[in-house]
Amino acid sequence: MFHTIFYEPIYNLLVLVLTYAPLHDIGTAIVIVTLIVKVVLLPLNLSALRSQYIMKRLEGEMAALKEEHKASPQEASKKMMEVYKREKINPFASLFTVLIQIPIFFALYFVFSKGLFADPNSLYSFVSFPETLHTKAFGLFDVMDKNIVIAVLAGLSSYVLARRQTASMVAPKKEGKDESFQDQFMKSMRIQLLYVLPVIIGFSAAVLPSALGLYWFVSNVIGYAQDVYIKNKLAHLHTI
């Protein structure tokens, strides 16, 4: 199932783009494929950002629910979930948009782990593998080899993007009050996304073919620009 749903589409998309990319440059092909992936995932990103803004707007109502049911955290959580259902939002949408990229990353890994080659069993009938293949991206580095510079860029850009995307998870400190389970969970999730995930991405990019690091770096750059643009477009939700 993974081979059919993820590997084959990514493999054929990369080969198809590589065929028409300027100078058949593998680096350019990876950038274009990354852009296409981000466009495909755009509806999920829109949903996640919409949820973030509505949750920000509901902070006062949520605080009132916590105070009203402070003796029963379970009841408070139940009431909060009812609010989420009423507003048609998913508080974990942002995490889902991160997780959905994992199988795409693995598909790219399998494409490049053994070297990009013509695979008749995976190649679609309307896609032709280029007669000559150059694996040096932008004339600077071979995407089949490890590259520490690309790895560092992948890790740093992941941190910068995560810092922006998790800014809304920061809850104001409450004097004399213990943090609720939800506050602790959101704080823990923010730490995982902000510090653990970028380290994992950077380390993985350092030991894997640099094509994967290039994908993550370009994905993060596009993601940051996309996040700025979409949040500006959705800013009105904060004041509704």
Image (cartoon, helix red, strand yellow):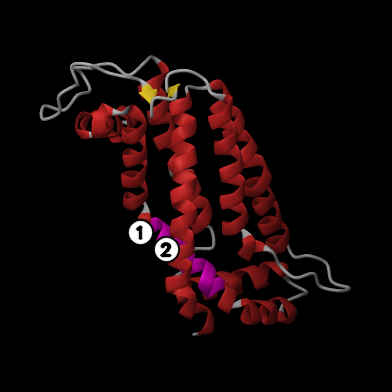
Q: Element under label 2? A: helix
Quarter of the image where one finds residue 58: bottom right
Q: Residue at x 48, y 68 (%)?
A: 231
Q: Residue at x 55, y 37 (%)?
A: 154
Q: Is residue 169 magenta?
A: no
Tell me: 33 left or right of 83: left
From the viewer's side, name the closer residue of 186 and 164: 164
Mark seen at residue 43: 1
Mark seen at residue 147: none
Q: Element under label 1? A: helix
Gap between marks 2 and 1 measured at Cα: 6 Å
Which residue sits furthest bottom? 240
Question: To which residue does mark 2 refer?
Answer: 47
Q: Is residue 38 visible?
A: yes
Amino acid type, residue under disc 1 in the picture: Pro
Verify CB contact (< 8 Å) between mark 2 and mark 1. yes
Image location (x, y in percent) of residue 59: 63, 77
Q: Residue at x 73, y 71 (%)?
A: 72
Region rendered in magenta: 43-55
